[in-house]
Image (cartoon, helix red, strand yellow):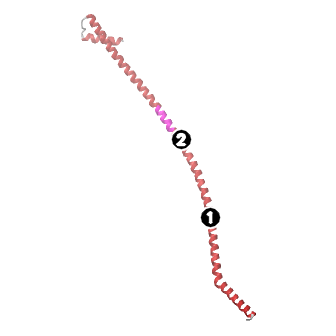
Amino acid sequence: MNLNATLFFQMIVFFVLAWFTMTFIWPPLIKAIDDRRQKIADGLAAAEKGKADLAQAQARISLIESSAKTDNQAKLAEAEKLASSIVESARSEAEQERARILAQARQDAELEAQRVRDGLRNDVAALAVKGAEQILQREVDTKTHAELLNQLKAQL
């Protein structure tokens, strides 16, 4: 065989193979590589967008937390004010009730003392009449008895 013919046929096979590869194999391979490159770029863009969304969400969360803390502190202060006003109101009502109970107790004590005094006067008057009866050894009539009792009550 001739070296030139072999080289010539090898060159023709090489060019046919190169043409076949560039026509039928290379475009789908390049298309697959471009699709893969696009998917990777989309994934990276989505990851960056996710990071940005995460940072934005964390900023919103911290803003909401600080706002909630401020709101909670304001509500707590308002609740403390309300509680102190309720305590003051209850304290003043309790003072008024205490004063009323004391006044009522004083009045009841005075009435009871007056009732006891009246009872003692009646008992002393009855004892005095009984003593006078025994001294005189006779009974005083009822009319005189009532008059004597009234006089004793007036003197006591």
Task: Decide: few, some or many residues near mark 1? Use Cα within 10 Å; few <14, some 14-19, many ≥20.
Answer: few
Q: Quadrant of residue 153?
A: top left
**Tags 2 and 1 touching, CB below 8 Å:** no
- Residue 149 image-quadrant placement: top left
The quadrant where residue 58 appears: bottom right
- Give the distance between the C-alpha atoms of the residues marked 2 and 1, in whole angstroms: 45 Å
Q: Is residue 9 magenta?
A: no
Residue 52 placement (x, y as % from top left) = 63, 62
Instruction: Confirm whether the magenta stretch covers residue 86.
Output: yes
Residue 117: x, y in percent? 36, 16
Which mark is on residue 80?
A: 2
Residue at 34 percent across and 15 percent down: it is 120
Instruction: Name the element at disc 2.
Output: helix
User: Could you say which is closer to the camera, residue 28 or residue 55?
Assistant: 28
User: Label 2: how many residues lie within 10 Å, few (<14), some (14-19) or many (20+)?
Assistant: few
Residues in magenta, as a range: 85-94
Label 1 element class: helix
Measured from the top left, where is residue 110 in percent x and y?
39, 21
Amino acid residing under circle 2: Glu
Q: Which residue is mark 1?
A: 49
Q: Taking 62 as reference, is 100 above or below it?
A: above
Q: Which quarter of the rendering shows the N terminus?
A: bottom right
Q: Give the left or right position of residue 103, taking residue 128 as reference.
A: right
- At label 1, the amino acid type is Lys
Eyeballing the image, is 126 above or below 72?
A: above
144 left or right of 59?
left
